Image (spheres, helix red, strand yellow):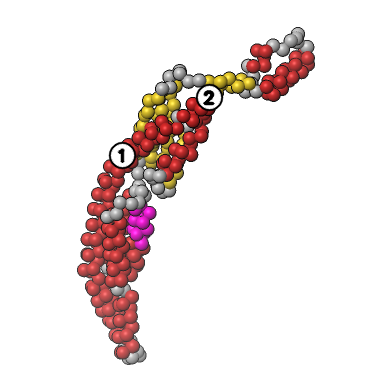
Amino acid sequence: MTGYGYGEVTTSTGKVIVEVKGVNHRFLDVVVRVPRAFNCFEEVLRRLVQSVSTRGRVEIYLLVEDSGNKNFTVKVDKELGMAYYKALEELRGHLGLAPPISMDNVIMQHGVLTLAEIQGEVSAMGPFIEAAAKAALKEFLKAREEEGINLAKDIIERVERLKEISRSMYGEAPGVVNFYREKLSERLKEFTDFIDPVRITSEVVLLAERADITEELVRINSHIARAEEVFKHQEPAGRRLDFLFQEIFREINTIGAKAQNLTISKLVVEAKVEIEKLREQVQNLE
């Protein structure tokens, strides 16, 4: 399901802001975006998302706004500076330039001087980051819950329609068997002089049984009942519902192949449309 959440915590050095965005996805895919100095919190944020979500692509962003009250330290990479100095001296001699190589020429090279926030202050941000993340996830879950209520309403309505279709098929089922029995009996009457009448009767009964769709309808109703039971429990249901609707679709296909009946054929088409919609919807559920 889709959703958005925002969390903000004010600290003595600025603000900690966490945003959470979620879109539909068959499995759980967590993407964490943090400033490089705060990479140590990436796994913490990932676990927080995993603790509340089992499905969807969830992106969580961390932004730390600096009010200017932080302590920084300047780090010097002496070995890198010396390597740059030697390389510049060699280049100066090769080009025949006047000496010397100045300090400015060395320290302006990438990586010789780096500005770093004192690590103790980064570590101290942990409780604030976690608080902002939990606030954002709470808002995110609320948005997903609201969407889930609307999705569940639509799914329940479509399941009710499937039950109506199943009842209509039950009403037509005896007619399908009788139709096959009568049609086959008429065809076989032409061969009564060559075939034992008892054998004809047994063949008619056998083929009529093969055309019977009662067994498929029983399984469909069983799957529908299980789907309704899943809705009663407050736990992730998307994958289980997807499996149940896939099984119902398979039974409907079998009915379509067995019952050469215009009314049932129309009901089969209608059922397939509803099931396709249901399978699309449950992809958006936890």
Residue 225 vertical placement versus 115 (above, below): below
Q: Quadrant of the N terminus?
A: top left
- The residue indicated by pointer 2 is 118
- Image location of residue 6, percent across then percent down: 35, 32
Q: Nearer the viewer, residue 169 or 286?
A: 286
- The amino acid type, in three-letter code, at marker 2 is Ile
Q: Residues within 10 Å of mark 2 (few under 14, many from 20)?
A: few
**Is residue 95 part of the magenta span, yes or no?**
no
Q: Which residues are magenta?
A: 237-247
- Taking the spot 76% from the left edge, 8% from the top edge, the residue there is 98
- Left or right: where does residue 190 sit relative to residue 34? left
Residue found farthest to the top: 98
Q: Is residue 105 visible?
A: yes
Tell me which numbered mark, 1 or 2, is placed earlier along the sequence: 2
* 126 lies left or right of 229: right
Q: Nearer the viewer, mark 1 or mark 2?
A: 2
Which residue is at 28% across, 82% downward?
Answer: 185
Q: Which residue is mark 1?
A: 143
The quadrant in which residue 82 appears is top right
| SS at badge 2 | loop
CA separation in Å, label 1 and label 2: 38 Å
Q: Is residue 175 left or right of residue 17?
A: left
The part of the image, by quadrant, that contains residue 13 is top left
Q: Callout 1: few (<14), some (14-19), or many (20+) C-alpha neighbours within 10 Å?
A: some
Residue depicted at 41% across the width and 22% down the height: 12
**Tag 1 and tag 2, C-beta contact below 8 Å:** no
- Amino acid type at circle 1 is Ala
